[in-house]
Image: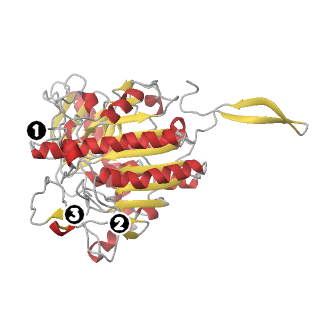
Amino acid sequence: MGCPLRRCAILAVVVAGISSDCRVVQADQPARPNIVLMMADDQGWGDVGYRGHKVLQTPHLDRMAAEGVRLDRFYAAAPVCSPTRGSMLTGRHPFRYGIFGANVGHVPPAEVTIAELLSRAGYRTGHFGKWHLGTLTTTVVESNRGGPRGAKNYSIPSQNGFQKWFSTEAKVPTWDPLLRPKGERSRTWWKPVSELRQSNFYGTNYWEDGERVTADLRGDDSRIIMDRAVPFIKAAAKNDQPFLAVIWFHAPHLPVVTGKSYSDRYPTVDGYHQSYYGCLTAMDEQVGRLRKALDDAGVREETLVWYCADNGPEGKATAPGTAAGLRGRKRSLYEGGIRVPGIVCWPGEFKAGSRSVVPCSTSDILPTVAGLLGIDLEVELDGLDISGVLAGVTRQRTTPIGFETRGQVAWIDNDLKLIARVEGPPSSVGELLDTELYNLRRDTGEKVNLSEQLAEQAIAMTKALQQWRHSVRKSLAIYSANN
């Protein structure tokens, strides 16, 4: 492997006007890899085969983990959807710009997104799948906020640096995404709709470059998304243009629906579990399709692929999704709500089969990519350039990770994690209540509260967490004053 995270440029030497076969290596030339950012929706930390799931089949993710860097302490920036997505695009905690929860706020124009950065650097940029960072229409009443009722939060991908997009505002069923069976009241799962006359409109549309899509939307939703992403990637590769493809699946967010060919793979479990596992296996199949498309286009070695989830699994412990022994689930800042699958592949740059337990998060994606491209950032970030972690040379995180969701805060400083309750509106800091401290290296399940035993560390971490929260409020005040 060459210099970590650098592609050395090969320059032809011209002497006295005559082209020479001699070549010179220009060291430390910033890399220009293609970037693919894939994210599942509500996939638990244990919802992958490579973590030893006894039933679920995810062969392509397992292969990706074996061929790349497996981040075993990778965190979503929030335990719910929209804030995590904002963090991935901006490298900043979403409370800085008013995205306090799902279906709240939007990405404001002042925020610099990864798509804007890469577009300026000559990349072709595309978003495919779930957006959830603003409404996609001010005229059609749909989804959670679409139409006049949510006009103040109109913020489409093309306003945030994406030149091509095929997106939904929010969730859809994971099979026949625009349809719901007539009379079906379940919010968790159902069998696929076989005929249009047996169905109603689910309530959320796909939009492509600002136009509502009505064709080619039957079957597996993950395939429908990849049907648009793969041609985008192949076209960019054919034109020798670097690209950013952000692919945000809906699976396995409820309602989970899957085809018979997928549910039949799980004959020993009930219908809900069959649908959940089936839609994940179908999504996994599209991960494999994406990787094959990179091979077919001849750009696998020039492409960094990052895979993660946006938060922990939905539902109670009896639901199909699993946090694999971690405490808590979606909406919780305990590990089960925020620790998610994380894999990064870049053949020839990252050692195959690497594993890291350094805490990393979705906020680290933008600064890491910017670092690869030699882009200087002049904005206050919450994420770090973790290229050293990916290259296997960094063993500790230099700056802790702060978390805040409604009524909960947390601070992760390598092995130690502080978690507490807070009261008051998101615009206030407030005091921490019921503080708990855990050593995650020894106590992954967060069972032994060390706040009294390690009182000095707890006090120091509380102070650092509150300082960070004050910083977030300063950013929020600036945002609020301008909007």
Image check: 211 left or right of 53? Answer: right
Three-letter residue code for mark 3:
Leu
Residue 113: give x, y in percent of width and height: 45, 54
Circle number at residue 395:
none
Disc nearer the start of the sequence (1/3): 3
Q: Which residue is mark 3?
A: 179
Image check: 251 left or right of 392? Answer: left
Q: What is the spatial separation of the Cα atoms under label 2 and label 3, in whole angstroms?
A: 13 Å
Image check: 23 left or right of 316? Answer: right
Question: Outermost residue toward the top?
Answer: 442
Specify few, some or many for label 2: CA neighbours under 10 Å numbering under 14, 14-19, or 20 or more: few
Disc nearer the start of the sequence (2/3): 3
Disc nearer the start of the sequence (1/2): 2
Q: Residue at x 40, y 24 (%)?
A: 354
Q: Which residue is mark 1?
A: 269
Q: Secondary structure at mark 3?
A: strand
Residue 481 falls in image quadrant: bottom left
Q: Which residue is mark 2?
A: 215
Residue 66 falls in image quadrant: top left
Image: 420 above or below 239 = above
Q: Secondary structure at mark 2?
A: loop
Q: Residue at x 52, y 48 (%)?
A: 377
Image: 318 above or below 448 = below
Residue 171: give x, y in percent of width and height: 25, 58
Three-letter residue code for mark 1:
Val
Residue 203 falls in image quadrant: bottom left
Specify few, some or many for label 1: CA neighbours under 10 Å numbering under 14, 14-19, or 20 or more: some
Question: Quarter of the image containing the N terminus?
Answer: top right
Q: What is the spatial separation of the Cα atoms under label 1 and label 3, in whole angstroms?
A: 25 Å
Residue 118 in sight from this viewpoint: no
